[in-house]
Image (cartoon, rainbow, N blue to C red):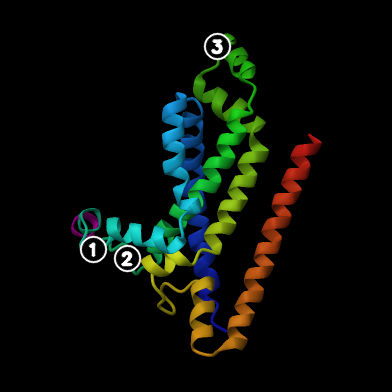
């Protein structure tokens, strides 16, 4: 059994989770403090990938990152980086589809934060950066951690946008999700079912982790 799809899926999910962690947190922090009209507009834009079909997200990414498109051509000519049909393309796809989970979870945590704690820190002469990382983030850690775990799970199981942007090449771009489809399509049901069991096991562990975080957050 070739374990490349599992290793590649974990690599893509881990990298995209790190990227989404910081992008989601900072987007949630600044948008939570924005005026209502701007907040509503940005919220709709940033949450769209959550409700759009993954194949539509993948198609939109191709319109932006394709080698014949402006951004895709610039990346290829400037850095020699071909975004499509590579395993790195899977990272772009996973970031796009999992970002709303981190963003909305983090925004909910920040909006429930007691701002008097931040005001108290400022009266003590603490910097905004210190307050953010040492006061706000620890208080909101349960929501942040839950969003991070959900982001990883979503990125690990992504298929639609990944298949559009990265395709399926054994040993190069294959992931668990794309491998299951290709194995089923070629009649290798036994091997496809093994990958399904692997994915189910990982998903069960992720959901258990989220439940434990929620229970811990409720107890505290």
Dot 2 falls on a residue whose secondary structure is loop
Residue at the far bottom in the pictured view = 187
- Going 20% across and 54% down the picture, which residue do you hit? 70
- Above or below residue 139? Residue 204 is below
- Going 54% across and 24% down the picture, which residue do you hit? 130
Is 158 on the left-hand or right-hand side of 114? left
CB under 8 Å between discs 2 and 1:
yes
Which of the marked residues, 3 or 1, is nearer the chain's N terminus? 1
Q: Is residue 34 magenta?
A: no
Q: Which residue is mark 2?
A: 84
The stretch in magenta equals 74-80
CB under 8 Å between discs 2 and 3:
no
Front-lying residue, 36 or 105: 36
Is 208 on the left-hand or right-hand side of 123? right
Q: Which residue is mark 1?
A: 67
Is 35 on the left-hand or right-hand side of 85? right
Dot 1 falls on a residue whose secondary structure is loop
Dot 3 falls on a residue whose secondary structure is loop
Within-10-Å neighbours for mark 2: few <14, some 14–19, many 20+: many
**Image position, residue 176 (x, y; %):** 54, 72
Q: Which residue is mark 3?
A: 125
**Image position, residue 157 (x, y; %):** 55, 64
**Image position, residue 197 (x, y; %):** 66, 75
């Amino acid at each position: 059994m070739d374990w490349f799809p599992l290793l590649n899926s974990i690599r893509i999910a881990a990298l995209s989770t790190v990227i989404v962690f910081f992008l989601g947190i900072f987007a949630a922090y600044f948008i939570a403090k924005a005026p209502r009209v701007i907040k509503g507009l940005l919220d709709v834009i940033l949450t769209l990938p959550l409700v759009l079909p993954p194949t539509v997200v993948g198609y939109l990414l191709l319109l932006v990152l394709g080698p014949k498109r402006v951004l895709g051509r610039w990346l290829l000519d400037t850095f020699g980086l071909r975004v499509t049909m590579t395993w790195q393309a899977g990272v772009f796809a996973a970031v796009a589809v999992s970002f709303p989970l981190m963003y909305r979870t983090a925004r909910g945590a920040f909006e429930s934060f007691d701002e008097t704690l931040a005001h108290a820190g400022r009266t003590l002469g603490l910097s905004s950066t210190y307050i953010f990382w040492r006061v706000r983030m620890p208080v909101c850690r349960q929501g942040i951690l839950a969003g991070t775990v959900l982001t990883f799970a979503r990125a690990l199981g992504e298929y639609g946008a990944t298949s559009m942007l990265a395709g399926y090449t054994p040993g190069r771009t294959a992931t668990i999700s794309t491998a299951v489809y290709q194995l089923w399509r070629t009649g290798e049901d036994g091997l496809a079912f093994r990958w399904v069991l692997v994915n189910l096991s990982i998903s069960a562990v992720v959901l258990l982790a989220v439940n434990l975080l929620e229970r811990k957050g409720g107890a505290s």
